Amino acid sequence: MNLNENVVTAGVYVNINGLFPFQVGPTKAGTALGVVRLGGHRERDETGWQCASREAFEEAALHIVPVKPPATYWYEASDEPELIVGGWQEGDVEPILVGKRTPGNRITPVYLATSHDSPVPSAETKGILLLSPADIANIVSAPITLGQYMESGGRAVFGDALPLDFPLEPFPHLRLLDILIKRHPEIVANAAHAAIRPR
């Protein structure tokens, strides 16, 4: 089976000196600010990695280099996904996460990467939060507004002004990154040394 043919969307966790850029912007309801991983829909013949790499550049002006993950975890998209160690046999770049949706065996791989660039929000990106592991744990564990995040020393780059009194709403991939960091703290410290270049 060609796994890339089943890829609908792809994303990436980019480690920039121990900080992970996530998009931030109003949710559809307009009452909170969603915290969303970099990534998007696959175009034509792209691999999952090619999609994630293109989206990181289009959304945050980041040139990224893949990092070999400590494991690849598969999960069924749900409110409380169970991470199950699996494999990935497509090409030289392995994702750290693969989300599955049925029907249609649609999948979303999420990769680890590093970059020497500073993120810059694109015209469609309202802002980018640069999250430390502690920031991630705080956002997923209790309600926090954008203003509280900034007052606590949080880092961000804004393309548009965002309401500081709006709560930050962690989307699923942020919650999953929190789990992964607790399970594999080396993905924070060792990313720059573990970078691999696709052939």
Image (cartoon, grey):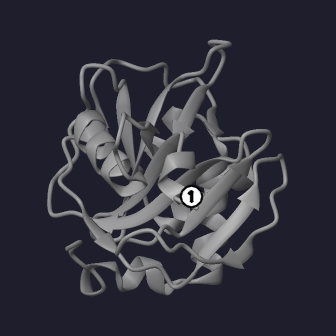
Q: How many marks?
A: 1
**In this orientation, does residue 84 appear?**
yes
Residue 99: x percent and y percent?
Answer: 66, 54
Residue 114: x percent and y percent?
Answer: 28, 67
Q: Residue at x 25, y 20 (%)?
A: 123
**Left or right: 123 as drawn, with respect to 181:** left
Q: As shown in the figure, which amino acid type bears the numbered disc 1? A: Ile
Give whichever of 184, 82 is nearer the camera: 82
Name the residue at the front extreme.
Answer: 1
Look at the picture and state if 115 lies above or below 140.
Answer: below
Quadrant holding the C terminus = bottom left
> Which quadrant of the figure has residue 121?
top left
Give whichever of 31, 104 is nearer the camera: 104
Residue 126: x percent and y percent?
Answer: 36, 24
**In this orientation, does residue 153 appear?**
no
**Left or right: 154 as drawn, with respect to 140:** left
Quadrant holding the N terminus = bottom right
> Which quadrant of the figure has residue 81?
bottom right
Query: Callout 1: few (<14), some (14-19), or many (20+) C-alpha neighbours within 10 Å?
Result: many
Give whichever of 60, 197 is nearer the camera: 197
Residue 107: x percent and y percent?
Answer: 62, 49
> Which quadrant of the figure has residue 132?
bottom left
Q: Residue at x 47, y 47 (%)?
A: 10
Q: Residue at x 54, y 66 (%)?
A: 134
Look at the picture and state if 2 lies above or below 11.
Answer: below
**Left or right: 79 as drawn, with respect to 127:** right
Which residue is the site of mark 1?
Answer: 136
Q: Residue at x 51, y 85 (%)?
A: 70
Q: Which type of secondary structure does the marked residue at label 1 adopt? A: helix
Look at the picture and state if 191 lies above or below 28.
Answer: below
Look at the picture and state if 53 lies above or below 186.
Answer: above
